[in-house]
Image (cartoon, rainbow, N blue to C red):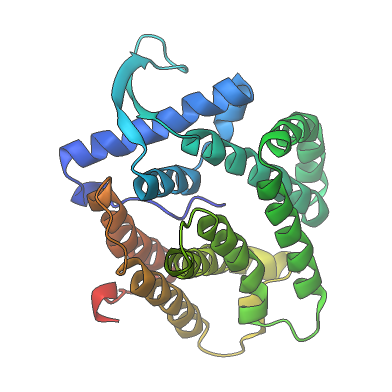
Amino acid sequence: MFGYIRVQKSELKLREYDAYKSVYCGLCRQLGRDYSFLSRFLLSYDCTFYAMFIMSLGRSCSGFETGRCRFNPMKKCSYCKCESDCMSKAAAVNVTLAYYKLIDDISDSGFFKRALCRAVKPFLSRWRKKANARYPEIDSLAAGMMRSQQEAEKSPDCGIDMAAHPTASFLSSLLSAEAQSEAQKRIYSQIGYGLGRFIYLADAADDLEKDIKSGNFNPFNSEKENNRDVIGNNLSQALAMTFDAYNLLDLTDFRGIIDNVILLGLPSVQKEITGTEVKDERSV
């Protein structure tokens, strides 16, 4: 994932922000435990949200504890405690996606970035193998996403929907795996699909100018007119899809924070990318 699923910090209550930081620091600590100290540099907002979301679904957060920061031992941090394997699962998603993103960068980047990526590949390859040993289903989904993405981008008929589908399908499958019933599966799948579509399209919109210059594939590059409108409309549709399904959930743990991300954080990201205001998702 790419770091687009973020909170709107200014709108969080103090206790909510402290809880969010506790999940973020907890995932950082989990990465170090499961992989290595260096893997903590891969920590993303997207996977922090994923950890928080699946903990909320299972009500598996058992409180918070204070400890020394792994990066700065002089600083104390609050860490979220989890009764299930949510943190380990989120850490596995983090390193697995980082590995496949690196593989993609090696094929698409220039000489110097490609050389740097090859230098760090042995580390990510080792971490990905460890993650695969524990959560083979995550690696299978990520590998399938990568193959589907490459096939889609090579197709002469590839448009916005086809290009966004692999990432959307990946996150849809990832969340729906947490479901305990068919009704939950449909809701989680729809939330995941909307979020995955938003992430892919936000990244594509963010990279549009760079991709035009480099000649790399970008689904928005084929639109001849009103690029900003096309981008904004597609991002808004993804947000509306996400919110419609999310509104069916009855969450208690971390509800205020997750509301903040979906209703404020994601629209803020869209505004940052497109430069235009986004309608409140509750009115879409």
- Figure check: 281 above or below 115: below
Quadrant of res 243: bottom left
Horizontal relation, residue 179 to residue 99: left or right: left
Q: Nearer the viewer, residue 218 or 212?
A: 218
Residue positioned 38% across, 51% down in the render: 6
Horizontal relation, residue 263 to residue 106: left or right: left
Q: Nearer the viewer, residue 100 or 241?
A: 241
Query: Of all residues shown, which one is farthest toward the bottom?
Result: 225
Measured from the top left, where is residue 34 in percent x and y?
Answer: 60, 25
- Figure check: 219 above or below 268: below
Q: Nearer the viewer, residue 255 or 185?
A: 185
Query: Of all residues shown, which one is farthest toward the top?
Result: 74
| Quarter of the figure with the C terminus | bottom left
Measured from the top left, where is residue 5 in percent x and y?
Answer: 43, 54
Measured from the top left, where is residue 159 in percent x and y?
Answer: 67, 83
Horizontal relation, residue 89 to residue 104: left or right: left
- Figure check: 172 above or below 104: below
Residue 36 appearing in the image: yes
Measured from the top left, where is residue 71 in percent x and y?
Answer: 47, 18
User: Disc count in the image?
Assistant: 0
- Figure check: 19 above or below 252: above
Q: Nearer the viewer, residue 207 or 11?
A: 11
Residue positioned 66% across, 40% down in the render: 135
Residue 280 appearing in the image: no
Residue positioned 73% across, 70% down in the render: 217
Horizontal relation, residue 151 to residue 263: left or right: right
